[in-house]
């Protein structure tokens, strides 16, 4: 039973499911389902698919997450970023003879498989390695491209389709102008989007005025409503439903779907009923590797971020691995039911939570609501495409995050460069290429930082036992024959050469009699690091230079013991902290101790007093005996005038 609960979290939810929770979940399901019908239609349009497939994306994937998910409020469905990746990948599918739907199902299938596999193996971190700067730059460029791609529909123009491939099969019955409303695919870069838009203006006529007025009115309405949401209006209010219903009603009453009255493109006839079981062409993985990685990564990052946010508010926990499995299952199951990739949506979840969702079953209830337009598609016949384009454009505006770019410019220039590279490459090269290049640049910077970590020569803050970088803090106490050096990284094959070269450079410059290596930032060491450290130990022995290692981590100490380096050095070379090591060196040669010129006590021999060290994992303190464990013992220390 415990195994079933771990694999099917819904069992725990049902166990304590009461009447009040049922009512709250029903309310949330109805509000979310009805409110996001326009959004589902619009996102399918962005993905380059007939609108009905947006409804399919809110059916089986949502039910699958309800069974496996651990977040009570998360509402699963299509989101703008994933739809954009699906649309952009259609050109890849077309090159292999796939139509738009077939490409979308392949992406859904393999992104689901990848997420499930990583979730089962506990390797969710693999798809969470894209930096915030790369994602933000990517999303900002996508927001701009989305607005350009939908501008033609908003203006009532016939924008050229950027995908050359088989058409998506759907109903053969169309409205009087349905043949003039192709399924728009995402452009390959902002340049192509602008070219398509400019070319579309060649067919401009006065009939487009109706589309402009309708689409522009929806944009203005949605922006105004957003300003008051959460203040005068409740958080759970679905923004898109009212303008969509009004526009559909106006189009039907005044006949704006005909050429005589303005030629506003409408959804027209959609297929009625559920699709038969679809079989993704899963053998075609290689061409879609890039989009699949992006879908799996961004889908998981977005879904987990939203889940954790609401879990903190509700004072409960979500299990990251189980969430990855749940989202992967939603995509995998959806690929057999004509659904393109989905994840947890920020705005959709806010509405679901605001409406009172208590368990993931609220999502299952919203899926039932989605069956209504699927079996009664006539109710969506007059929904204008300019209205859907307006919904997408308003949704894309928050993606353009210039504030983060400005913040990165102020605090971290390297991350700002990653943002710019990701933004420009996405905007002018392509969607998949942009994010991958941005991620690659961020990883190059990570490797560079790891290969060339910070290091510092330390001095003591007067009157304390603390040591700081001599470059950062002036007027530190320094030592003539004692080199105190800190290395701020794990010591492994990537930076072993840098460690050796930098240390030897300091050794040649300062010619010390004692070297104190502050190792508290060295939290790990591998074979290459051990070899470099052993070589340095041998060199210092030849030069008769005493090496003291301070603050060595337990993990590093165990590796050194297994290697034999600990025994080679001897326990008298290991100290708990830098101050203990320095005091030991000064005790060996008091002439090493130096204070600022006017300071009192220069040249004074350090007196020795006795104190007791009562706790701590002891390596060596001053000239005390080295032992592991907790103990009481006498050690040498210095009077306060030397501290």
Image: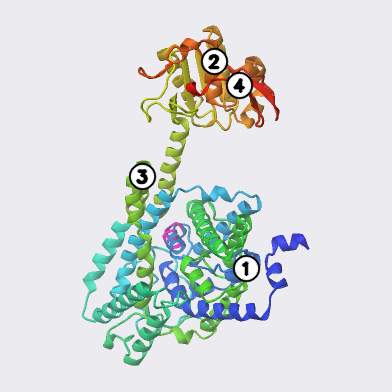
Q: Which residue is mark 2?
A: 607
Q: Tell me the quadrant of the picture where the N terminus can be found.
A: bottom right
Q: Is residue 592 visible?
A: yes
Callout 4: helix, strand or loop? Answer: strand
Sequence-wise first label, 3 or 1: 1
Work out how far the residue at label 3 is from the one at label 2, CA to CA, in angstroms: 47 Å
Sequence-wise first label, 4 or 1: 1
- 390 left or right of 637 in image: left
Callout 2: helix, strand or loop? Answer: loop
Work out how far the residue at label 3 is from the one at label 1, CA to CA, in angstroms: 42 Å
Crowding at mark 3 (Cα within 10 Å: few <14, some 14-19, many 20+): few
Work out how far the residue at label 4 is from the one at label 3, CA to CA, in angstroms: 38 Å
For the point 58% across and 55% down, which residue is it?
115
Q: Is residue 513 visible?
A: no
Residue 562 in the image: x percent, y percent? 68, 24
Label 4 or label 2, whichever lies nearer to me, is 2
Rendered view: 91 above or below 241 = above
Q: Which residue is mark 1?
A: 64
Residue 279 in the image: x percent, y percent? 59, 66
Find out whether the residues at labels 1 and 2 contact each other: C-beta distance under 8 Å: no
Q: Which mark is residue 411?
A: 3
Residue 636 in the image: x percent, y percent? 60, 19
Magenta span dominant secondary structure: helix
Work out how far the residue at label 1 is from the one at label 2, CA to CA, in angstroms: 74 Å
- Name the foreground residue: 346 vs 471: 471
Residue 280 found in image quarter = bottom right
Residue stretch rendered in magenta on the structure: 86-92
């Amino acid at each position: 039973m415990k195994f079933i609960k771990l694999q099917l979290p819904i069992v725990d939810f049902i166990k304590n499911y009461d009447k009040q929770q049922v009512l709250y979940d029903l309310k949330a399901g109805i509000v979310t389902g009805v409110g996001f019908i326009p959004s589902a239609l619009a996102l399918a349009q962005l993905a380059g698919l007939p609108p009905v497939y947006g409804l399919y994306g809110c059916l089986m994937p949502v039910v699958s997450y309800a069974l496996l998910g651990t977040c009570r409020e998360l509402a699963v469905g299509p989101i703008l970023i994933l739809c954009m990746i699906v649309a952009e990948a259609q050109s890849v599918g077309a090159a292999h003879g796939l139509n738009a739907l077939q490409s979308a199902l392949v992406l859904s299938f393999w992104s689901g498989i990848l997420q499930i596999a990583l979730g089962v193996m506990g390797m969710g971190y693999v798809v969470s390695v894209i930096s915030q700067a790369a994602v933000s730059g990517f999303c900002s460029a996508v927001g701009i491209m989305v607005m350009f791609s939908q501008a033609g529909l908003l203006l009532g123009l016939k924008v050229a389709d950027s995908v050359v491939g088989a058409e998506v099969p759907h109903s053969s019955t169309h409205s009087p102008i349905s043949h003039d409303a192709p399924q728009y695919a995402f452009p390959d870069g902002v340049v192509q989007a602008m070219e398509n838009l400019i070319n579309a203006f060649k067919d401009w006529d006065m009939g487009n005025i109706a589309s402009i007025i309708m689409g522009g009115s929806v944009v203005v309405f949605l922006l105004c409503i957003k300003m008051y949401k959460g203040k005068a209006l409740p958080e759970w209010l679905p923004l898109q439903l009212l303008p969509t219903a009004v526009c559909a009603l106006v189009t039907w009453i005044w006949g704006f779907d005909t050429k005589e009255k303005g030629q506003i493109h409408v959804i027209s006839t959609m297929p009625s009923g559920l699709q038969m079981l679809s079989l993704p062409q899963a053998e075609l993985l290689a061409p879609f590797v890039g989009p699949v990685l992006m879908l799996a990564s961004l889908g998981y990052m977005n879904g987990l971020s939203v889940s954790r946010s609401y879990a903190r508010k509700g004072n409960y926990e979500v299990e990251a691995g189980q969430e990855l499995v749940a989202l992967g299952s939603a995509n995998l199951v959806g690929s057999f039911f004509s659904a393109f990739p989905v994840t947890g949506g920020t705005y959709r979840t806010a509405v679901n939570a605001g409406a009172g969702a208590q368990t993931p079953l609220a999502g299952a209830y919203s899926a039932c609501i989605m069956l209504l337009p699927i079996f009664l598609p006539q109710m969506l016949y007059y929904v204008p495409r300019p209205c859907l384009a307006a919904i997408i454009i308003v949704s894309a505006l928050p993606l353009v995050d210039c504030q983060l770019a400005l913040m990165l410019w102020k605090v971290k220039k390297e991350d700002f460069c990653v943002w710019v590279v990701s933004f420009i490459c996405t905007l002018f090269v392509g969607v998949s290429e942009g994010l991958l290049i941005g991620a690659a640049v961020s990883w190059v910077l990570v490797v560079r930082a790891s290969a060339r970590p910070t290091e510092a020569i330390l001095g003591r803050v007067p009157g304390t036992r603390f040591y700081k970088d001599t470059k950062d803090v002036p007027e530190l106490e320094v030592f003539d024959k004692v080199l105190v050096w800190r290395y701020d990284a794990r010591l492994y094959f990537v930076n072993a050469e840098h460690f050796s070269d930098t240390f030897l450079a300091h050794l040649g410059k300062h010619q010390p009699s004692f070297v104190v290596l502050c190792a508290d930032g060295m939290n790990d060491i591998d074979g290459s690091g051990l070899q470099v450290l052993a070589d340095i130990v041998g060199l210092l022995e030849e030069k008769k230079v005493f090496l003291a290692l301070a603050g060595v981590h337990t993990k590093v100490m165990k590796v050194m013991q297994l290697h034999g380096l600990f025994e080679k050095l001897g326990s008298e070379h290991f100290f708990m902290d830098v101050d203990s090591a320095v005091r030991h060196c000064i005790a060996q040669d008091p002439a090493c101790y130096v204070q600022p010129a006017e300071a009192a006590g220069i040249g004074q021999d350090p007196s020795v007093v006795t104190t007791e060290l009562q706790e701590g994992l002891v390596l060596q303190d001053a000239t005390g005996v080295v032992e592991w464990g907790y103990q009481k013992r006498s050690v040498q220390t210095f009077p306060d005038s030397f501290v």
